[in-house]
Amino acid sequence: MKISYQLKQVRERIQKGLVDKGLLSTSKTNFLLFDMATHPTTPLGITLKASIITRINALLFAKSISIPQAALQEEGTQCRVLRSVALCIASYAASVLENALGQAQGRAGPAVLGFEEKEEAFQRCDEILQAFTVVPFLSPTASSSSTSSSSRRRGNRPASTSSTEQEAIAELTKEAMKEIQLEGGDSWELYAEVVGAVFELWGRMDSIL
């Protein structure tokens, strides 16, 4: 009960923050005997949401080892790779990733993804989560044994990862480590520990709640 109340407070604070940023608006909606405050998405919020979904899909459905530019924010953005990784892991941990999959894949509208395609995207995100909960960030092969407790695999999905997948995630971890070392300077290890701890917590949200 206490956790539920605290989460409600967090949700309200997030809503207020998004309203202040112009991504949500505030209106009153009548529900029979009382009015309730609602927060519709503004045009700016819709545009930003579409951009986030595009980046998530670009990262999880990438067919090459290199990081797609569509998965990153514009040049000059601080920690571009780490931000995209955080988006994927956060949506995965919050159980909203499935809603975003395929939404930016087709020009005529959302792509219709098969079961296997969705499972592959979930598996890649799961492997990314595992890789980024060990400091220094490691490739899936190196990190799987030490981070299996943070895995949020759906059902009995196999944990195997192809060599291309391993190389792609290894490229993510390498570029993210470069960003942290650049931003953190001599204290980069502390920065990395904080990031890894946050991702580890996100991965354990189901058991915590």
Image (cartoon, grey):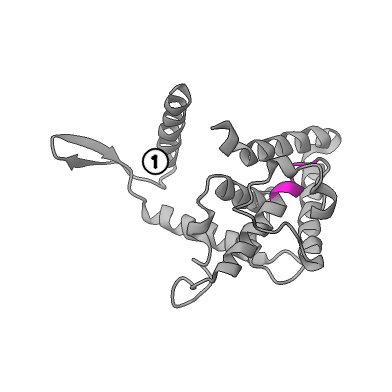
Magenta residues, as a range?
Answer: 129-134
Residue farthest to the bottom, as pictured: 108
Residue farthest to the front, as pictured: 156
Please give left or right for residue 72 compared with residue 66 in the image: left
The residue lying toward the viewer, choosing from 27 and 185, is 27
- Residue 167, located in which quarter of the rendered image? bottom right
Q: Position of residue 121 (x, y in %)?
A: 62, 62
The residue lying toward the viewer, choosing from 116 and 98, is 116
Q: Residues within 10 Å of mark 1 (few under 14, many from 20)?
A: some
Q: Position of residue 147 (x, y in %)?
A: 76, 42
Residue pictured at 60% horizontal, 50% vertical? 87
Q: Please, what is the three-letter code of the amino acid marked with disc 1?
A: Val
Q: Check disc 1 and report the residue beneath it.
A: 19
Q: Position of residue 179 (x, y in %)?
A: 77, 48
Q: Position of residue 48 (x, y in %)?
A: 48, 55
- Is residue 60 part of the magenta span, yes or no? no
The residue lying toward the viewer, choosing from 207 and 98, is 207
Residue pictured at 62% horizontal, 39% vertical? 202
Please give left or right for residue 74 compared with residue 67 in the image: left
Q: Regarding mark 1 in the picture, which secondary structure is present there?
A: helix
Residue farthest to the top, as pictured: 2
- Residue 11, located in which quarter of the rendered image? top left
- Tell me the quarter of the image containing the N terminus: top left
Residue pictured at 38% horizontal, 46% vertical? 24
Q: Is residue 155 above or below residue 54?
A: above
Residue farthest to the left, as pictured: 33
Q: Is residue 57 above or below residue 138?
A: below
